[in-house]
Amino acid sequence: MGLEEYVGAPELTGEVIYQPGWYLLAVPPEAHARLLTLLDPLGARHKPAGLPRASVTRNEAPNQSQEDSSTAFGGERVTVRYSTTVRDENGLRFRIDCHSERLCEIREHFGLVTLKRDNGWHPVNFHITYSRWGELQLEARRPRQ
């Protein structure tokens, strides 16, 4: 999804949480409920994620600002714009693309890739993982040998 497609897209605001090796944006319950309705037209059996989230950094060694890597952004509230197109390429989880300038700034703080354009836009797309296939459907999707 190009950044231009996020103009006017729906938004949600979550809280940045730090877990060892991982900064994530936790999706609040009311926003999670809205995201789950995107699965209705698919008729897919699914199990809502216990921790609906967008990964900001995960097991990436910061090149700079290591001294505050566990304390810099925890508790901050960040708004993202998100696509309403459901993706399940990995065959395990449902997710949607999302974007936030602030999430890109957090990555920049640690010296991580953001691919910033000359016009100031960051074409890094994040995604929100918010559900997974139900057990019966996972079994049906596994290749038979």
Image (cartoon, rainbow, N blue to C red):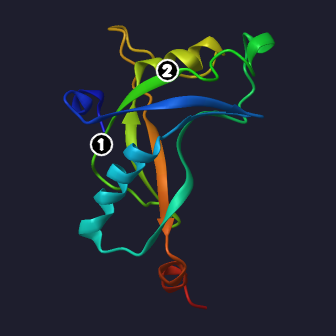
Using the rendered image of the protein, determine whether residue 115 is visible from the camera's viewpoint. Answer: no
Q: Residue at x 50, y 75 (%)?
A: 134
Report x, y in % for residue 6: 26, 31
Q: Dot 2: within a 10 Å radius of its alpha carbon, few (fewer than 14), some, or many (20 or more) residues?
A: many
Query: Which residue bears the numbered disc 2?
Result: 104
Q: Which residue sits furthest bottom?
A: 145
> The residue under label 1 is which amino acid type?
Ser
Using the rendered image of the protein, determine whether residue 58 is visible from the camera's viewpoint. Answer: yes
Q: Residue at x 42, y 34 (%)?
A: 125
Q: CA distance from mark 1 to mark 2?
A: 17 Å
Query: Left or right of 57: which side holds 62?
Result: right
Report x, y in % for residue 43: 30, 74
How many numbered marks does the figure carry?
Answer: 2
Q: Is residue 51 above or below residue 92?
A: above
The image quadrant of residue 30 is: top left
Is the N terminus in the top left, top right, bottom left or bottom right quadrant? top left
Report x, y in % for residue 39: 32, 63
Report x, y in % for residue 26: 54, 38
Is the C terminus in the top left, top right, bottom left or bottom right quadrant? bottom right
Give residue 143's mark.
Answer: none
> The residue under label 2 is which amino acid type?
Cys
Lower position in the chain sequence, tag 1 or tag 2: 1
Query: Which residue bears the numbered disc 1?
Result: 83
Query: Left or right of 28: which side holds 20?
Result: right
Q: Is residue 145 above or below residue 104?
A: below
Q: Which residue sits furthest front?
A: 30
